Image: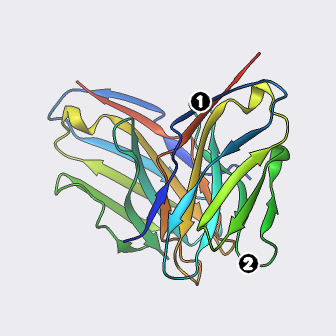
Amino acid sequence: DAGVIQSPRHEVTEMGQEVTLRCKPISGHNSLFWYRQTMMRGLELLIYFNNNVPIDDSGMPEDRFSAKMPNASFSTLKIQPSEPRDSAVYFCASGGDTGELFFGEGSRLTVL
Amino acid sequence: AQSVTQLDSQVPVFEEAPVELRCNYSSSVSVYLFWYVQYPNQGLQLLLKYLSGSTLVKGINGFEAEFNKSQTSFHLRKPSVHISDTAEYFCAVDRSTSGTYKYIFGTGTRLKVLA
């Protein structure tokens, strides 16, 4: 089992550019989550999908952020346009029936 | 509103000494409780979980936690720590009784094990 796979691991971009983060959940898991981690705010849930359907996006900070899950094996988190305050580590996690979340290794985003 | 409080942001401890990382939660309903560990530059991984049954839960790497409903606490303990236990530890509550991942994470406790 390869675990949750995220790409890219590191992204450096300039303010105003579009950023797309990608996630492949564990096969068979029906729930997928996007989290953001910063020193100031800790771990924040951005959005939660169940069976590819967005269930709770109340954590998405603003309209510049969007997330999609076109199928059970792929999700994207897009920021357009990016701003320096979006710099953070973005984690994708998936879960099945056990109550346990499995996290990817994260995508470290730096917006200059 | 639901909340999880980890009172200690950092805990330094010498190698082979015992450690307790504290976690308190507020909830008026049944909850599932979790401890996750995050090693540097990695994602979080599950240490242990309490869903029901025995209030003393054993996890990986020699860690254990005790669910105390009256004190709404779920403190993490290890009798003898190793240098490799240096990491950040997160307590989490899933307030959904059906396990649908309504997680709330604490702010984390950074454990530093000293030689």
- Residue A68 at x, y percent in the picture: 35, 63
Q: Sequence-wise, which precedes: disc 2 or disc 1?
A: 1
Depicted A52 relative to depicted A27: above or below: below
Q: Which residue is mark 2?
A: B52
Query: What's the mark number on residue A15?
Result: none
Instruction: Tell me which chain the residue with mark 2 is part of.
Output: B
The residue carrying pointer 2 sits among few (fewer than 14), some (14 to 19) or many (20 or more) residues within 10 Å by Cα, namely few
Compare residues B112 and B45 and report the one nearer the observer: B112
User: Looking at the image, which residue is at 68% across and 68% down?
Assistant: B68
Q: Residue furthest top?
A: B115
Crowding at mark 1 (Cα within 10 Å: few <14, some 14-19, many 20+): few
Residue B71, position as x, y percentages in the image: 61, 67
Quadrant in which the C terminus of chain A appears: top left
Q: Which mark is residue B40?
A: 1
Dot 2 and dot 1 residues touching (CB under 8 Å): no
Q: In the image, what residue type sits under mark 2? A: Ser
Q: Is residue A97 left or right of residue A12?
A: right
Amino acid marked by disc 1:
Pro
* Secondary structure category for the residue under label 1: loop
Left or right of residue A49, residue B43 in this image: right
Q: Quadrant of residue B66?
A: bottom right
Tell me which residue sits at (18%, 36%) in the image.
A83
Distance between the alpha carbons at the discs numbered 2 and 1 = 31 Å
What subunit carries mark 1? B
| Depth check, front residue: A24 or B82 | B82
Left or right position of A60 against B75: left
Whether A106 is drawn above or below A92: the answer is above
For label 2, the SS is loop
State the image coordinates of residue B41 (x, y, percent, origin top left): 56, 31
